[in-house]
Amino acid sequence: MPQLPIGEVRKTSSGYSARHTTRKGERETFEFHPAIRTIEAAEARSAVLGDLAQRFRKSGAIESADAIKLLHKVAEVAEDQLAHVLLFAEKVIAGEVRHKTAEMPTFAAFAERWTSGELAQKHPDHVKAKDSAIDKQRLAWICKIGYGFATLGSLPLNEFKLDEAEHAMANLPPDAKRPATRRHYAQAIHKLLAFAVFPCRLIAAHPLPKGFLPKVGKPPRYPYLFPQEECELMAHVETPIEWRMFFGFLSREGCRPEEAYAFQVRDFDLRVGNVTLDENKTDDPRSWALNPAVALALRAWVKMRQAKPNDFMFVHPNGGPITEGNRPAELLRAALLAAGVDRHDLHNDGTNTRQLRARDTRSTFVTLSLANGRTETWVADRTGHRSSVMINKYRKRAREAQELRLGELVPLCDAVPEIRDFLLNSPDFVSRDGIEPPTRGFSILCSTD
């Protein structure tokens, strides 16, 4: 039996290292992972390293600069990552890994083309334009995962196959535990590779088999806002009015946050009191009659800002558009805490429950609407739900709200102090339904006595 190429193992002040022959006549020092603390462990890793270097020389792969980097990676990785690096090394020896070319983008570069909107602009018939902030975050994590001597993101797109996808799924962030969350990461990978097949035609066939996507599983329960809690948030003038108008609208009208991001002033007929939503998740345009108090509040909001028809209806406090990248869920929870709303369910995860998200303003709308006698059809006209199955999921919480006698949300025109004060000093603002400017004090409406 041939002797294992252990090489020259040394102990230094920082740990263990080994010297091995790489190319003919060349020797190089490889520093081992800090967890390798005994001479036995160092010799074992050095034997793996020496054997791989020897096989690289025999296959000719050693002439590649990537092979030297890979040898260093074998020395540096922790024990639980070694198998993945060696799997990649086998592909290098077999000639399955090719150098990147100008024609074949890396996985990371192609991901950027998708999440930046470039693919949607270039292929509008096949790639839908949307806010890709969440997919961008997920793909950014995947691209940084170590693989071989580099990262998954550095791989040429045609070399990202099932092994690489499974490696990505085995190294998701610690908070990606639930089946639905893991499925979202898998969907991002799957969709990106699908675009590479068509319309971009960079690879011949989709490399992931049917069944790759994890099953969804039972979703966790998310909370909804009680009217008193929402009232306290709207009254908290230290929270920028831009955020309060945005969240207040969502809770009273039921559309998705990403739909509200794109609303322009011209999408609303505030004299008549309706809104038209053209582009949305289901590609099903809809319009509905606004709550009269919401319509009045939005009329005041537009007047206060001197907003033009092409301006966004809801804006960031800095004047720019609201996007998922602004992390509205974190902003909503922080604003609630600042307003003194600290109910445990809103701010903490449980085993089968999750803290409040921005889209749970939609749950608030559906739950309170059903609790206060609104029909399923009335709710669906505003939320865009296509089946009663989805709406029925809220009925148990609606019964709870009814039994607790939570009531309805305070009218938006009276809930936001700045809007109320503007209307009190603007007697010309009267809605088509005869809603007069509010006359009751906000503190009375929110009284807990």
Image (cartoon, grey):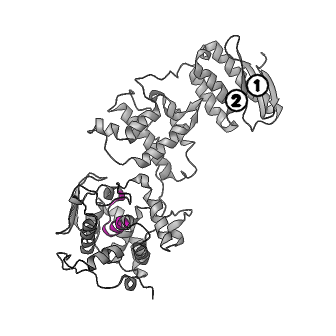
Classify 288 as above or below 412.
above
Q: Relative to 293, is 261 above or below? A: above
Magenta: predominant secondary structure element?
Answer: helix
Query: In the rendering, at what x and y percent does residue 309 appear?
Result: 21, 58
Element type where label 2 sits in the image: helix
According to the picture, the residue beneath numbered tag 1 turns out to be: 18
Residue 147, given in percent of the width and then of the height, sits at 58, 33
Position of residue 394 relative to residue 28, above or below, is below
User: Magenta span has 251?
Assistant: yes
Secondary structure at badge 1 equals strand
Instruction: Tell me whether circle 1 and circle 2 mark residues in contact (CB < 8 Å).
Output: yes
The three-letter code of the residue at mark 2 reads Ala
Residue 197 rendering spot, x and y as whole percentages: 37, 31
Furthest-top residue in view? Answer: 25
Which numbered tag is attached to residue 75? 2
Q: Which residue occupies 47% across, 58% down? A: 219
Identify the residue at image location x=57%, y=31%. 150
186 falls in the magenta region: no
Q: Is residue 49 left or right of residue 140?
A: right
